[in-house]
Image: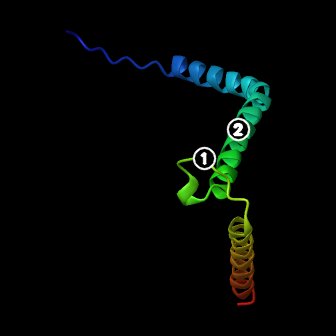
Amino acid sequence: MVNVNLKVPAFEMILKYTASGIGAVAGPMLAPWKARREAAARLIEAEAEARRSLIAPDDAERGMLNIGPGGIQQRIEFQEKKRQANIASVVRGGSRRSR
């Protein structure tokens, strides 16, 4: 078997410019499609996360929603933990800026 490695600089440049031109034209044409696909994927992830947060661990096998006081408390605690993390993040960010 003979392996021939032939490089033609002019041909390589033509391929490079052609690929660049196709990307420049196709990129904006495909951007709305790509954005819709990414949004649909984020929506699916958000719905799954919402279901996981509403289903108590012991009821997960049965698919039961925990809407009672315990579930309300879990949601409140989750929100407060997020708020506390945000406050801590702002405080850490603020101390870096003042240096």
Mark 2: secondary structure? helix
Q: The residue under label 1 is which amino acid type?
A: Gly
Pick whichever, 64 or 3, lies toward us: 64
Q: Position of residue 2 (x, y in %)?
A: 22, 10
Q: Nearer the viewer, mark 2 or mark 1?
A: 1
At 67% across and 53% down in the image, what residue appears?
65
At 66% across and 27% down in the image, what residue appears?
20
Q: Residue 53, located in which quarter of the rendered image? A: bottom right
Reply above or below: 56 against 19: below
Q: Residue 77, located in which quarter of the rendered image? A: bottom right
On-image quarter of the C terminus:
bottom right
Q: Residue 54, located in which quarter of the rendered image? A: bottom right
Residues packed near mark 1 inside 10 Å, few (<14), some (14 to 19) or many (20 plus): some
Q: Position of residue 44 (x, y in %)?
A: 68, 41
Mark before the other along the chain sequence, 2 or 1: 2
Q: Position of residue 78 (x, y in %)?
A: 69, 70
- Toward the left, the furthest residue is 1
Q: Position of residue 33 (x, y in %)?
A: 76, 28
Mark 1: secondary structure? loop
At 65% across and 46% down in the image, what residue appears?
48
Q: The residue under label 2 is which amino acid type?
A: Glu
- Numbered label attached to residue 63: 1
- Residue pointed to by mark 2: 38
Q: How far apart in space, not on screen, are marks 2 and 1 (Cα)?
A: 28 Å
